[in-house]
Each structure stands twice: as C-alpha cells, then as structure tokens.
Image (cartoon, grey):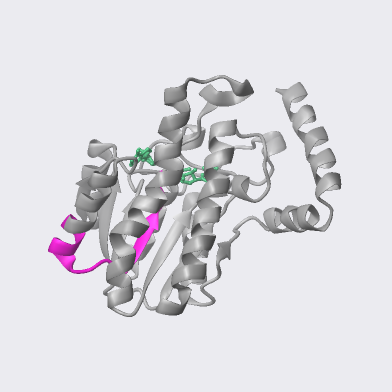
C-alpha cells in the first residue's frame, strides 16, 4: 500500500499509539485527520502535524458518521481508517462494575469498530478498495491480566475484523489488526502526545514497547505484506501458537502465571 497522498483518519490520536500512528502517516505524506474525545489533545496534535482535528466520541455512531463526513469534506473520501481509540477498565476487575461500565466499554472498544466500518466500507467498495486498521490488543488472542470488560471487547473486535475481511476482502477492503502486548502510553500514565519516552521496567509485564516503535512496525507491515495480524511483540505469536496447539495446557500455564503476578502485586 502507498501512503503518500492518502486520506487517513486516526481515532484516539491525542495520545499513545494513535498519536504515533498519525505522526508516522503524516511524515509519509498522508492527509491525516486527528480524532479523539479529548478536544484539547485533538487541537494540540492537529496543530503540531498541520492536520485536520475533529473531536469525536467513537462510542456514538452518529459522531463517527460526522467524523467521516468532516474528513471527506476536507480531503476527499477516506482511504485508511485507523480505529484505534480504546481504554482499559479496572472497574470491572473481579467481576465488579455496573451495567453502565460494561455498556460503555462495549460501545468504545467494540461497537466503535462497527460504526467505523459502516461509515467507510461502502465508499471503499465503490472506489475499488481501502484499508481498515483496527487497534485491538494481544488480549484478543491470549487472555491476560486485563479486566473482563477489556477482555471481552477485544475478543469481539477481533471476531468482527475477521468477519469484515472474509466478506469484503475480495472487494479490495484490506483489514489489519494491531494486537500489541504492553506499550508505554497514557494507559501506563504517560503524558498525552509523548510517543517516544523510554518505558520503565514493568517487571512481570515483560517487554514494554514505545508507541513510536509500534507505529513504525505497523505501518511498515501495511506498506509491505498487509498482514491480518500485526504482532509487534513476538511473545504474543508464540503464546497464541501454544494456545492453538494445546488449549487446556495453555489455560493451566496462564492461570499459574496470573496467580503469580497477583501475588507479586
Ligand atoms: N498501551 C498498551 O499496552 C496497549 C496494549 C494493547 C492494546 N492497546 C490499545 O491501543 C489503543 C490505544 O491505546 P493507548 O495505549 O495508546 O492509550 P492512550 O490512553 O495513550 O490513548 C487512547 C486515546 O483514546 C482516546 N479515547 C478514549 N475513549 C475514547 C472515545 N470514546 N472516543 C474517542 N477517543 C477516545 C483517549 O482520549 C486517548 O487519547 C486502545 O485501543 C488500547 O486498548 C494498548
């Protein structure tokens, strides 16, 4: 895939991985739209990159339609939509959390991918193709220490992405799912807009990547092999393979690892 001149929308672009993706697409000559629910962050990143900024809550289908309309009005039809916004939800850990807590994370981490696809795929098909990049998580492939709301929404997002690529791949719509393990971003307390500070040692979490490295890895993959799964941490592919080979053994081993992590906390 060529990136120069393409119209690229990135959600959750005020911080972390989204900010790094937007910065890299901009360096490569794309026309980038910065979108986030954090309007100050949108203004800051958009002015830094000379990009269009649109404040959007991706959990709201009408707002996602309005984002795509604004991008199209400014630059033309969307070529690449990076559905990246998301959050983790410690409030549902230990099977706690209210109905509203679960509904909100389903809206933002799962249904937002559906609203994005509904808003851009028909026009991509009409024009002979386009690209959806879904930032999901290793939690979609190999359940880890995250809370249940995060875990179930990331599994669902991967299932939806599989459905899109199976039904629209032959019409030119490419889909890649970015499934990283730990990345040093706002989720770990890093300031919005900082994409390249060196991560501290996070012990049992293992290698923690910088979001700039994750973005470079992802966009290189999109420009070359266009894989369905983008796995910047090699340990994720190893663990996914162990799970596929012997699910029960993988569950027993992961259960032991999670217990140990909790005891060390
Ligand atoms: N950091 C990690 O270790 C890690 C690992 C795997 C997957 N991810 C995924 O990467 C994506 C980006 O997260 P990050 O780590 O860069 O975190 P981050 O907190 O640095 O950035 C997330 C951005 O999404 C925005 N956002 C949250 N809710 C939104 C909404 N309703 N509408 C629009 N924007 C919203 C936030 O304002 C923030 O700017 C998420 O989907 C996350 O689940 C992160």
Quadrant for the C terminus in the image: top right
- The mark total stands at 0
Indicate the quadrant of ligand 1 in the picture: top left
- Give the quarter of the image for residue 123: bottom left
- 233 shown above or below 38: below
Residue ID at (57%, 51%) = 180
Residue ID at (54%, 45%) = 154
Name the residue nearer the viewer: 92 or 197.
92
**Coordinates of residue 85 in the picture (x, y in percent):** 40, 45
Left or right placement of residue 257 versus residue 129 in this view: right
Residue ID at (51%, 20%) = 97
**Coordinates of residue 22 in the picture (x, y in percent):** 34, 57
- Give the quarter of the image for residue 37: top left
Question: Which range is magenta?
Answer: 70-85
Q: Is residue 73 magenta?
A: yes
Name the residue nearer the viewer: 179 or 19.
179
């Amino acid at each position: 895939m060529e990136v120069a001149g393409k119209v690229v929308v990135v959600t959750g672009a005020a911080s972390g991985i989204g900010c790094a993706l937007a910065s890299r697409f901009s360096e490569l000559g794309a026309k980038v739209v910065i979108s986030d629910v954090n309007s100050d962050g949108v203004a800051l990143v958009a002015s830094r990159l000379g990009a269009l900024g649109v404040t959007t809550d991706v959990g709201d289908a009408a707002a996602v339609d309005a984002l795509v309309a604004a991008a199209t009005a400014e630059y033309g039809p969307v070529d690449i939509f990076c559905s990246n916004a998301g959050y983790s939800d410690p409030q549902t850990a230990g099977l706690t959390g209210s109905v509203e807590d679960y509904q909100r994370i389903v809206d933002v981490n799962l249904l937002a991918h559906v609203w994005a696809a509904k808003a851009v795929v028909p026009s991509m098909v009409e024009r002979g193709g386009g690209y959806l990049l879904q930032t999901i998580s290793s939690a979609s492939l190999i359940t880890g220490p995250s809370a249940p709301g995060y875990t179930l929404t990331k599994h669902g997002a991967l299932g939806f992405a599989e459905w899109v690529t199976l039904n629209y791949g032959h019409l030119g719509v490419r889909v890649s799912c970015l499934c990283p393990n730990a990345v040093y971003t706002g989720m770990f307390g890093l300031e919005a807009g900082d994409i390249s500070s060196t991560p501290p040692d996070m012990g049992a979490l293992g290698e923690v990547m910088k979001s700039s490295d994750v973005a470079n890895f992802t966009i290189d993959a999109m420009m070359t092999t266009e894989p369905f799964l983008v796995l910047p941490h090699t340990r994720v592919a190893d663990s996914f393979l162990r799970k596929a080979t012997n699910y029960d053994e993988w569950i027993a081993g992961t259960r032991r690892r999670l217990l140990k992590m909790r005891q060390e906390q």
